[in-house]
Amino acid sequence: MGRSATPASRLAYSLILIFFLSVNLRHIVIYVIAITYRADLADAARKLKSLLNASELDCSNKPEKVVVLGGDGTLLETIHRYPCVLDSLVFHIGGGRINFYRTVRVGEMSFEEIAKRIAAENYNIIDFSLINTKKCFALNEIIIRNLNYKKLLMFKISSNSFSISGRADGVVIATPHGSTGYAVSAGGPIVDVKLDALIISFIAPYTLYLRPLVVPPETIEITTYNDAELSCDGYEEEHGREFVVNKSDRRLHLAVFGEFDYYERVSQRLISL
């Protein structure tokens, strides 16, 4: 018969087991996938959530990957409500009219195939720049308007490169990819997403020499002579008469299935309702 283990040998065995477990645990990576969605897509979200073993989006969990199910507005709302998604890899399952920032459109492939591609890391990653003020980030544009919508906004805009004054219903400062949004509706140019620039457009300019500008990504200071409000991607954030807009150090990291054809997406945006 074998001898019983002594207390000392049992202790030594336990210490060795703890050591190997601690070494192995260092190599275990836990991936947290979170999902957020537009309310009318709740059923689709539940299915995708089950396939991905995902949780509801909560910044306290620091998700590595975030799935956004809805249109571009849902994506912008997610960035506004949950800034932590800028530290994650975002999969935008487009369920809107335009879906400019889509990974894939709803219906283009099955949810099973989407989950399989995410798990296999079968995607490309595109980084999109943001602009910011002291209180908010914007993926598309920042808009400054008179707090009293019935009156014109009087303003001065300046940076290291230029200075311009005038009156208009509002000022739009956009990123290159955001140039396809409200900026182009205000008469601004469509700017290639690869350019490092900012776009300034004017809403119904009363001062006729105010034309759209493409400027270096420098700090832009805006002084107004009326009480004004500033919004980031449609979300009101600041009131006052002095505003500072910068190109942000943060990025939206967007996963796309296949290649990202910027001009094909621009064309779809221009013919959309």
Image (cartoon, helix red, strand yellow):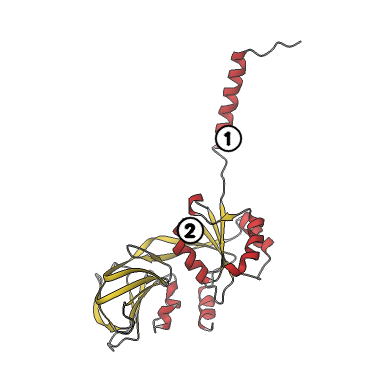
Relative placement, left or right, of 83 versus 96 is left
Circle 1 Cα neighbour tier, 10 Å, few/some/many (<14 / 14–19 / ≥20)? few
Q: Amino acid at mark 1?
A: Asn
Depth check: give the residue in front, 243 or 117.
Answer: 243
Indicate the quadrant where residue 154 lies: bottom left
Depth check: give the residue in front, 139 or 42.
Answer: 42
Q: Which residue is mark 2?
A: 85
Disc 1 to disc 2, C-alpha distance = 29 Å
Q: Quadrant of the C terminus?
A: bottom right
In the rendered structure, which disc, 1 or 2, sits on the residue that comes first in sequence? 1
Relative placement, left or right, of 155 versus 22 is left
* Secondary structure of residue under mark 2: helix
Depth check: give the residue in front, 90 or 197.
Answer: 90
Relative placement, left or right, of 264 versus 181 is right
**Which residue occupies 50% across, 82% down?**
270
Image spot of residue 225 (x, y percent): 23, 77
Indicate the quadrant where residue 255 lies: bottom right
Whether residue 18 is situated above or below residue 268 in the rendered picture: above
Depth check: give the residue in front, 157 or 136.
Answer: 136
**Which residue occupies 68% across, 65% down?**
110
Q: Quadrant of the N terminus?
A: top right
Whether residue 183 is situated above or below residue 24 in the rendered picture: below
**Which residue occupies 52% across, 53% down?**
63
Image spot of residue 173 (x, y percent): 35, 74
* Secondary structure of residue under mark 1: helix
Image spot of residue 261 (x, y percent): 54, 72
Q: Which residue is mark 1?
A: 24
Circle 2 Cα neighbour tier, 10 Å, few/some/many (<14 / 14–19 / ≥20)? many
